[in-house]
Amino acid sequence: MNIFRLLGDLAHLISKGILIFSIHRNKSAEGVSFLTQAMYALVFLARYPDLFYRFVSLYNTTMKIVYVVTAFYVLILMHSIYPRSTEGRLAWQITAITLALAALVGLIFNYVFTFTEIAWSFSIALEAFCVIPQLILLRETSVPTVITSFYLLALGSYRALYIPNWIYRYFTEGIVDPIAVTFGIIQTALYLDFAYVYYSRQRIKLRDGVLVDSEDYERGWIIRWFRRREGASLQSEEGAAEEGRIALPVDDAEPRPAPPKATARAEPPTAT
């Protein structure tokens, strides 16, 4: 193991510790995406099934167990102990799409068509896009979030340090993993986009968190892309309603005026 891999693992572990500490300290999980954390837990389950049948080293086994345990501990804190933010329809849709695409990647792009290799490829692809529901939630939230700059720095350092790790392994061992490198670059790009938005317009710090508004996160390219798609869908629905292709609810429609009552036509006077 080289120094870059070691530092990357430690940065990942520190990010987990900071998140757990912040949730306990604030007695809240507001601003933390439950969907993102659930996908992270799924990533570790899919990546480490060899815990049950293969021993590489004490360090390797310990780190895998810590990753799995901390991921599910965060889910327990958010689901059963502390209040958390409610995530909207867009975040759920993106999560479903991400899971489906990651499963497709696992089935198509793998080195050996076995369960463990498919699960590993699935976990690599899924981890690259786990942060998107978190980005969406932070754009929509208007309450203080427990996510801190230290957490973001540690999480970003974890993935950024893997890039020199790949370069080091290429020149010293002649090893290149196309799947890990491709999705690792995508994940790093998403983290950089998030960091740019976060640090460009940081708001008032409250409860060791940051109060943000939706305008801060519209600067990132990934959020702008989702907003354009969401806006196009909304405009399509409004246009369909105007054309009469979507029936409006009866309660929301304006009452129509009652037709005038018919009056009997006066008969002409008869001659006498």
Image (cartoon, rainbow, N blue to C red):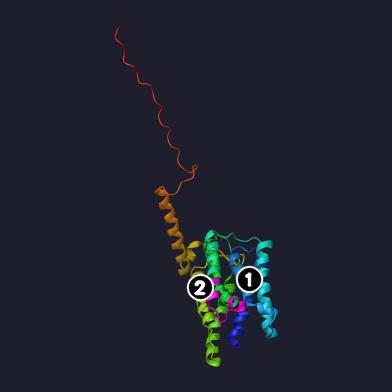
Q: Mark 2 belongs to which amino acid?
A: Leu
**Magenta segment:** 103-118
Residue labelled with disc 1: 41
Look at the image and tell me whether residue 220 can be seen.
no
Q: Give the percent coordinates (x, y) of residue 86.
A: 59, 59
Classed neighbour count for the residue bearing mark 1: other residues with Cα under 10 Å, few (<14), some (14–19), many (≥20):
many
Element under disc 2: helix
Among all residues in the image, which is located at the extreme left? 271
Q: CA distance from mark 2 to mark 1?
A: 19 Å
Badge 2 or badge 1: first in the primary sequence: 1
Classed neighbour count for the residue bearing mark 2: other residues with Cα under 10 Å, few (<14), some (14–19), many (≥20):
many
Q: Give the percent coordinates (x, y) of residue 131.
A: 55, 70
Residue labelled with disc 2: 190
Q: Mark 1 belongs to which amino acid?
A: Ala
Q: Residue at x 55, y 76 (%)?
A: 156
Look at the image and tell me whether residue 136 can be seen.
yes
Q: Nearer the viewer, residue 220 or 104?
A: 104
Among all residues in the image, which is located at the extreme top? 272
Q: Give the percent coordinates (x, y) of residue 207.
A: 62, 65
Q: Are marks 2 and 1 in contact (CB under 8 Å)?
A: no
Element under disc 1: helix
Dominant SS of magenta comes to helix
**Marks 2 and 1: which is nearer the front?**
1
Q: Nearer the viewer, residue 165 or 49?
A: 49
Name the quadrant of the N terminus: bottom right
Q: Give the percent coordinates (x, y) of residue 222.
A: 47, 68
Name the quadrant of the C terminus: top left
Q: Nearer the viewer, residue 133 or 219?
A: 133
